Amino acid sequence: MTTTTNGESSEARRRIAALPKVELHAHLSGSIRQAFLAERSASFRPVDVVTPRSLEACFEYFGAVRHVITDIAGLEAAARDVVASFAADGCVYLELRTTPKRLGDADEAAYVDAVRNAARTVEADMDVRLLLSIDRGVYSSSDLESSVDAATRRVGELRALAERFPGFVV
């Protein structure tokens, strides 16, 4: 029996890896593989995601994703790659979290539809759902009343968007 450096048997690790997995809060942008981004853009530079760093430095990755995923076709391809990666890891239930955006001429409904289409095209025995989020960074604490009003309107918009995609957006 082969053991790893921490004393686990390779058989135990294999059995654990084979277990079905549930992912309840995977950020779509944060789950896009760097290799995928590099394939789509010669200007993409890998981001160190292993070394401990500040939260601000963590957000560099999201910025890099925004520079590569600029249209609906790119979003759908990225979402398909993300869903396929989770499926390959044995995930049976996946909740992706994302903030819907306008990409090019496409509206936010097209954004959600692209992610849904991507999930449908991956052949896997996996249930995929989408959690819609708001970009809290756009609301200012300097004008709290108008920020609360704007955030409340945004939540209403996202709820209306969710109603257009029953069974997919949770």
Image (spheres, grey):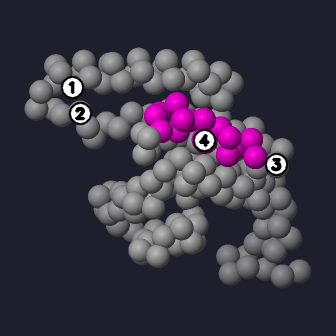
State which quarter of the image contains the N terminus: bottom right
- Residue 106's disc is none
User: Is tag 2's residue or tag 1's residue first in the polypeptide sequence?
Assistant: 2
Residue under pointer 1: 147
User: What is the distance, in whole Å, between disc 1 and disc 3 at their CAs?
Assistant: 42 Å
Amino acid of disc 3: Ala
Amino acid of disc 4: Ala
Identity of the residue drawn at 54% across and 35% down: 110
Is the residue marked by circle 3 packed among few (<14), some (14-19), or many (20+) residues within 10 Å? some
Residue under pointer 4: 114
State which quarter of the image contains the C terminus: top right
User: What is the distance, in whole Å, between disc 3 and disc 2 at their CAs?
Assistant: 39 Å
**Left or right of 121 on screen, residue 94:** left
In the rendered structure, are the residues bearing label 2 and label 1 in contact, judged by CB atoms less than 8 Å apart? Answer: yes
Residues in magenta, as a range: 106-121
Residue under pointer 2: 139
Where residue 35 sits, quadrant-wise, is bottom right
How far across and how far down the image is residue 115, in percent? Answer: 61, 42
Q: Of residues 95 and 10, which is closer to you in this image?
A: 95
User: Is tag 1's residue or tag 4's residue first in the polypeptide sequence?
Assistant: 4
User: Is tag 1's residue or tag 3's residue first in the polypeptide sequence?
Assistant: 3
**Left or right of 50 on screen, residue 39:** right
In the rendered structure, are the residues bearing label 1 and label 4 in contact, judged by CB atoms less than 8 Å apart? Answer: no
Amino acid of disc 1: Ser
Residue under pointer 3: 124
User: Is tag 4's residue or tag 3's residue first in the polypeptide sequence?
Assistant: 4
In the rendered structure, are the residues bearing label 4 and label 3 in contact, judged by CB atoms less than 8 Å apart? Answer: no
Is the residue marked by circle 4 packed among few (<14), some (14-19), or many (20+) residues within 10 Å? many
Q: Of residues 72 and 57, which is closer to you in this image?
A: 72
How far across and how far down the image is residue 151, in percent? Answer: 30, 24
